[in-house]
């Protein structure tokens, strides 16, 4: 008899999990509250413009390739020649080449940094990733039987040479001499919603993904990842129910036995929640004590994103663009969750300009600009008012860099922490679940399985190993490993 698995949520983590379980021979059913798949990865089409609404950078594409059947077309993507264009407040502009040797040479030239120090930093980031990723990114190390092995104890001992008890910024200050170099590498803390002045130095491995392994863009945009995974799942027989929000995960004898949707019971041999883990425990599970990893949450940052259809192009812009704040420490202080948020007057601005490589994303002669700044998660602020203040700061800052948006906007829509929370059910609109602002953050993340309820598993950005496309895909891989163990134990 074929086992049935129910997956709650059709974001990237849920889609990848559904595919992996279907490849194990299971009958997979997915329930999604929204009318389409994607979760935080969506798209807007208006007035001839198309916008990716969620993540905009793609790394570790092999995590998609390895679940793409050979009999069907795979996801088509291209490796970027330029990773990002950096704009500093003193008007210095730096194009970061994808080639690591060119990158170190050009960064040294533009900043005055010692080239050998940059090379050493990237080599250390590569070694840190090689050493730790099998344990901390691609396995359920929360199971003590897997963590406490001779090999893994060696991994944790080896981590000490990478200063895990220093903050990322403190480590980078020791590694480099030039402020611009430090700021460039500090930025990688924001890739999982963290603060470089608090997050551990081990997060420097994130730079390895871009600068040593490469950054990519799917042909047609980031939403193509969702479309590809969805089509693959359907071909494998996965059944999707859209606009069907799960009301409860059914528990019988301390095991997950299915779900209830609009009063109807759907039985299953196992359940995977690929939605927000806090919402899962607080809304969907009754009469079970909430785990400590959920109750004591230190949430990641969120964002305000302005989707702007522009009647012109800008030769100053690359595909990915970073306009750095002139006062990085003060910017991160403004993101503190201790106080209600006030938009910082000189924010770091990220602009994703996909029409540069996908011309069909904008009308001829136009641009589709995804303009983002970091914000705290939602604590009940008036985000409509804050968005207007932030917009003024953004337009003023870009004007200082010679980019005038004020008279060229043909279409505009904004996403805030409140709207992100409503769309994705992510707690308080936090983009990455828990923050990684402490050395123990990885250990404090919710595992991909439940210690309290048998046959209940977790995927997606709010659980181990974290948020963002590659880590959501990695969570699905871990769930597959856990389900394989469950099936072997049961038989």
Image (cartoon, rainbow, N blue to C red):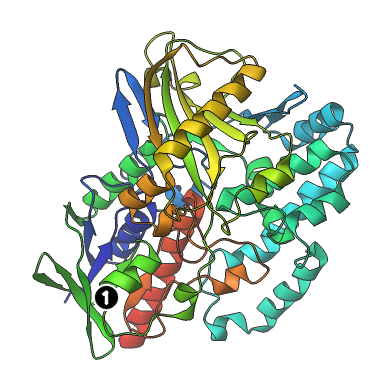
Residue 144 position within the rendered picture, expressed as x and y whole percent measured from the top left: 56, 85
Residue 22 position within the rendered picture, expressed as x and y whole percent measured from the top left: 28, 62
Position of the N terminus by quadrant: bottom left
Q: Is residue 441 above or below residue 302?
A: below
Q: Is residue 371 visible?
A: no
Q: Is residue 450 above or below residue 253?
A: above
- 165 sits to left or right of 47: right
User: Which residue is most to the left?
Assistant: 264
User: Residue 168 versus residue 335: which sits nearer the camera?
Assistant: 335
Query: Residue visible at 45% across and 53% down?
Result: 378
Query: Residue visible at 38% across and 43% down?
Result: 41
Query: Residue visible at 23% across and 49% down?
Result: 34
Tell me the element at label 1.
strand
Q: Is residue 461 above or below residue 375?
A: below
Position of the C terminus by quadrant: bottom left
Q: Which residue is mark 1?
A: 270
Q: Is residue 437 visible?
A: yes
Residue 87 position within the rendered picture, expressed as x and y whole percent measured from the top left: 69, 27
- Name the quadrant containing residue 198: bottom right
- 66 sits to left or right of 118: left
- 312 sits to left or right of 319: left
Q: Is residue 217 above or below residue 267?
A: above
Query: Residue visible at 17% across and 51% down?
Result: 243
């Amino acid at each position: 008899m074929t086992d049935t698995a129910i997956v709650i949520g059709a974001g990237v983590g849920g889609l990848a999990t559904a595919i992996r379980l279907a490849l194990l021979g299971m009958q997979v059913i997915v329930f999604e509250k929204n009318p389409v798949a994607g979760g935080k990865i969506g798209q807007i089409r208006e007035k001839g413009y198309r916008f990716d609404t969620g993540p905009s950078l793609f790394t570790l594409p092999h995590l998609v390739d390895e679940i793409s059947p050979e009999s069907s077309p795979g996801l088509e993507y291209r490796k970027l020649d330029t990773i990002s264009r950096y704009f500093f407040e003193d008007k210095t502009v730096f194009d970061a080449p994808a080639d690591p040797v060119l990158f170190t040479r050009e960064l040294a030239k533009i900043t005055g940094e010692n080239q050998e120090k940059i090379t050493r930093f990237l080599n250390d980031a590569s070694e840190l990733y090689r050493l730790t990723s099998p344990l901390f990114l691609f396995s359920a190390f929360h199971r003590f039987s897997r963590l406490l092995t001779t090999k893994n104890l060696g991994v944790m001992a080896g981590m000490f040479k990478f200063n895990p008890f220093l903050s990322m910024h403190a480590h980078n200050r020791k590694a480099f001499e030039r402020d611009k170099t430090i700021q460039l590498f500090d930025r990688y803390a924001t890739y999982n919603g963290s603060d470089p002045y608090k997050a551990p130095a081990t997060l420097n491995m994130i730079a390895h993904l871009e600068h040593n392994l490469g950054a990519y863009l799917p042909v047609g945009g980031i939403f193509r990842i969702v479309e590809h995974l969805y089509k693959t799942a359907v071909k494998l027989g996965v059944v999707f129910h859209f606009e069907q929000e799960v009301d409860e995960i059914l528990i019988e004898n301390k095991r997950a036995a299915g779900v209830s949707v609009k009063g109807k019971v759907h039985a299953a041999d196992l359940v995977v929640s690929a939605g927000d883990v806090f919402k899962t425990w607080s809304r969907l599970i009754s009469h079970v004590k909430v785990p400590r990893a959920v109750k004591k949450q230190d949430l990641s940052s969120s964002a305000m994103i302005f989707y702007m259809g522009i009647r012109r192009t800008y030769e100053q812009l690359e595909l990915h663009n970073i306009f750095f704040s002139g006062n990085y420490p003060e910017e991160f202080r403004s993101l503190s969750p201790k106080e209600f948020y006030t938009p910082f007057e000189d924010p770091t601005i990220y602009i994703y300009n996909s029409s540069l490589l996908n011309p069909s994303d904008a009308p001829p002669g136009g641009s589709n600009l995804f303009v983002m700044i970091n914000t705290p998660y939602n604590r009940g602020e008036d985000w409509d008012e804050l968005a207007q203040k932030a917009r003024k700061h953004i337009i003023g800052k870009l004007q200082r860099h010679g980019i005038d948006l004020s008279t060229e906007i043909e279409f505009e829509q904004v996403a805030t922490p409140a709207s992100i929370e409503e769309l994705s059910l992510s707690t308080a609109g936090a983009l990455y679940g828990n923050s990684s602002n402490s050395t123990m953050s990885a250990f404090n993340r919710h595992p991909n399985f439940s210690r309290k309820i048998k046959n209940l598993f977790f995927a997606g950005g709010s659980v181990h190993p974290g948020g963002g496309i590659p880590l959501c895909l990695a969570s699905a891989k871990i769930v597959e490993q856990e389900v394989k163990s469950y099936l072997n134990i049961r038989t």
